[in-house]
């Protein structure tokens, strides 16, 4: 199938061609025709599947087709709710990209930055408003956003918005929208909470399910390095030093951990920055653009800060620590191996994380390959308390043997699980 087969307006096809895309991704093939007919939509799709264009293109088509074309109001006609500011920025960028040959005005509003420029933007008039729920409610309370002309509502990464506790805000916002409207919902998972939200929101929806929860898990090469917790930093530096990595997204579980790890990498001569919720918006945007431009070798991120990070051709994702929630693992590794590119995900797993690893392997329905890095092997039983690694393990030796691949171990020894999970 070709984009031209979808019946999109010429201005949109031109923008798509300028992006270099000719074949719609599976979600685009299914979602674009459904949304163009005006139907509600429930799509199970992760970031990386092309879902943003999957809703942006048909929305733009509808806004500028037939009698609807005339802009009779300065009020927003489309509202896209997203969980994070990064995603807000990226979705709004997509609207600009695909709408560049149409007279569309879009705006992203999100917290953590001054509200006044957003107010000025809303006053000037907006067609497509992309917003995080909290900041949008601020605007509603200040009467600087008027949702009375919304024709299309999109909930993007709905599962993440629920995880982040936005459900009450979302319900408040929905209550303010005109009853007659088109609703589109995107979620990486189809949990009972998502089903409930969908049941109350969507009317006779078309349903698209391209992202089995483990889509990324099938396309990204993944492996696990079992090691001791107190060896992880040295191991990570060793991997950077010996493998010539240049653009690596590293996941840490906590904000503090992300900062500490970024400092360790910097000390080891690996240019790095951390992004997490405590960083100012300016610092996050700067770190992300330095990373994209290749000025930073490593970006250390927490799960929430990494949502929506969209880097074409990101080659490596490292799980310095495994996430608490197995689904987050799939989200994390979905940052690499995008749109057919090769990607690799490596997880450093210590004794206390073996339960998390089992949950992940159960979710993705396969055992991950184990890689042994000589000098950094996990001790046979969980160390009782942190011990310093042997001096030799910190500095890689020039003639160090290559990593050895081992077959996945279907039944891992139970005594390795310390049960001491700091969750
Ligand atoms: P998304 O899932 O919306 O975050 O998109 C993932 C990535 O795929 C983005 O970098 C898009 O620019 C890219 N992309 C979207 N549609 C296509 C397409 N039809 N062909 C190739 N790449 C695409």
Image (cartoon, rainbow, N blue to C red):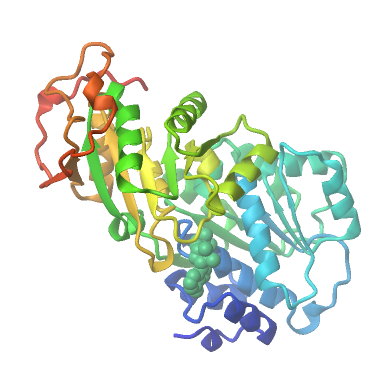
Quick check: 86 left or right of 315?
A: right
Residue 389 in which image quadrant: top left
User: Is residue 50 shown to the viewer in this render?
Assistant: no
Percent position of residue 183, x then y: 62, 61
Identified at 65% across, 51% down, the residue is: 88
| Above or below: residue 345 compared with residue 281 | below
Percent position of residue 120, x then y: 89, 50
Number of numbered labels in the structure image: 0
Residue 125 in which image quadrant: bottom right
- The quadrant of the image that shows the N terminus is bottom left
Identified at 18% across, 30% down, the residue is: 375
Percent position of residue 91, x then y: 63, 58
Quick check: 10 left or right of 188?
A: right
| Above or below: residue 203 compared with residue 161 | below
Quick check: 92 left or right of 291?
A: right
- The quadrant of the image that shows the C terminus is top left
Identified at 64% across, 78% down, the residue is: 15
Q: Nearer the viewer, residue 89 or 376?
A: 376
Identified at 76% across, 77% down, the residue is: 102
Q: Nearer the viewer, residue 83 or 393?
A: 393
Percent position of residue 277, x then y: 59, 33
């Amino acid at each position: 199938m070709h984009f031209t087969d979808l019946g999109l307006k010429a201005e949109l096809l031109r923008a798509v061609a300028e992006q270099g895309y000719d074949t719609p991704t599976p979600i685009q093939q299914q979602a674009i025709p459904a949304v163009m007919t005006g139907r509600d939509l429930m799509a199970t799709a992760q970031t990386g599947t092309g879902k943003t264009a999957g809703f942006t293109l048909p929305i733009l088509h509808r806004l500028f087709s037939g009698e609807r074309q005339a802009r009779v109001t300065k009020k927003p006609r489309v509202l896209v709710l997203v969980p994070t500011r990064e995603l807000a920025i990226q979705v709004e960028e997509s609207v600009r990209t695909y709408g560049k040959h149409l007279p569309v005005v879009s705006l992203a509003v999100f917290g953590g930055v001054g509200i006044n420029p957003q107010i000025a933007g809303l006053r000037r008039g907006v067609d497509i408003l992309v917003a995080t729920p909290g900041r949008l409610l601020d605007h509603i309370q200040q009467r600087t956003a008027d949702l009375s002309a919304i024709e299309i509502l999109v909930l993007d990464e709905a599962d993440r918005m629920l995880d982040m506790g936005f459900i009450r805000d979302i319900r408040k916002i929905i209550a303010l929208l005109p009853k007659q409207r088109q609703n589109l919902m995107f979620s990486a998972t189809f949990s009972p909470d998502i089903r409930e939200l969908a049941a109350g929101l969507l009317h006779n929806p078309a349903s698209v399910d391209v992202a089995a929860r483990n889509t990324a898990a099938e396309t990204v090469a993944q492996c696990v390095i079992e090691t001791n917790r107190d060896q992880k930093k040295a191991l990570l530096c060793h991997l950077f030093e010996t493998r010539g990595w240049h653009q690596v997204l590293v996941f840490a579980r906590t904000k503090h951990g992300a900062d500490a790890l970024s400092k360790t990498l910097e000390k080891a001569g690996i240019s790095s920055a951390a992004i997490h919720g405590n960083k100012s918006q300016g610092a996050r945007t700067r770190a992300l653009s330095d990373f994209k431009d290749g000025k930073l070798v490593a970006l250390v991120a927490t799960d929430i800060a990494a949502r929506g990070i969209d880097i074409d051709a990101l080659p490596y994702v490292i799980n310095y620590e495994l996430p608490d929630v197995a689904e987050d693992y799939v989200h994390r590794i979905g940052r690499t191996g995008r749109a057919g590119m090769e990607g690799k995900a490596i997880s450093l797993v210590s004794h206390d994380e073996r339960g998390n690893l089992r949950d992940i392997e159960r979710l993705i329905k396969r055992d991950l390959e184990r890689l042994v890095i000589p000098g950094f092997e996990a001790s046979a039983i969980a160390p009782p308390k942190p011990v310093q690694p042997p001096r030799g393990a910190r500095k890689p030796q020039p003639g160090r043997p290559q990593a050895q691949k081992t077959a996945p171990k279907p039944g891992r020894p139970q005594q390795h699980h310390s049960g001491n999970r700091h969750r």
